[in-house]
Amino acid sequence: MENTKEMKIAVYPGSFDPVTKGHLDILERASSMFDKVIIAVLKNNSKKSYMPTSDRVELIRKSIEEMETLKNVEVGSFEGLTIDYARKTGAKFLIRGLRAVSDFEYEMQLSQTNQAIAPEIGTVFLITKPKYNFISSGIVKELSSLGQDVSKFVPKSVVEYLQKHKQNV
């Protein structure tokens, strides 16, 4: 009998400007739930990013290489609607991380909009571990620009990148 089980593919979209340990916590848990997870960096031309998309992709690649558990994770980037990218990659699920209750309202509206446009694609919400609740990319960039050690919040490769580019934050 042939194995006709369809792969469960999920897309974890975001700006990841930069990727944090909170993002990687969500990614690690998602990777244990799905056959393949694509962490996808959104290139949003209407929003000024600190890091170029290619740098964000490379830093995520370096970060997941350091984590033994992420063998089923791919890194990509996209422009436009997340659901269009999900369709293109064959994903049936979107991963969204929640840090606090304040994140939920926005994420719920986004999920319901996506559901109306693409009913075949579901959203899975994962809550970060409490030790990462307060971490955001913006806080990391600000602390780094003020000379603070951010190694508790981001992978080593991101710390090195921020130190090298801190005058531009």
Image: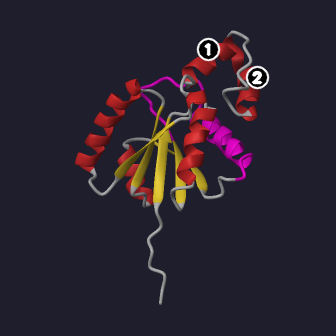
List x then y, in percent, for residue 153.
66, 27
Q: Is residue 7 above or below residue 66?
A: below
Q: Quadrant of residue 62?
A: top right
* Type of amino acid under label 2: Lys
> What label sits on residue 164 in the rendered view?
2
* Type of amino acid under label 1: Glu
> What label sits on residue 142 in the rendered view?
1
Q: Nearer the viewer, mark 2 or mark 1?
A: 1
Total labels drawn: 2
Q: Which residues are magenta?
A: 41-68
Q: Is residue 14 above or below residue 70?
A: above
**Residue 16 or residue 66, whichever sits in front:** 66
List x then y, in percent, for residue 27.
57, 45
Classify mark 2: residues with Cα within 10 Å, few (<14), some (14-19) or many (20+): few
Q: Residue at x 71, y 34 (%)?
A: 155
Q: Is residue 19 visible?
A: no
Of the two numbered discs 2 and 1 on the same chain, state the one appearing first in sequence: 1
Circles 2, 1 touching at the beta carbon (< 8 Å): no
Q: Is residue 105 above or below residue 67?
A: above
List x then y, in percent, for residue 63.
69, 41
> What label sits on residue 24 in the rendered view?
none
Q: Residue at x 51, y 56 (%)?
A: 33
Q: Is residue 24 visible?
A: yes
**Residue 130 or residue 83, whichever sits in front:** 130
List x then y, in percent, for residue 148.
72, 13
- Mark 2 secondary-structure assignment: helix
Q: Residue at x 47, y 90 (%)?
A: 1
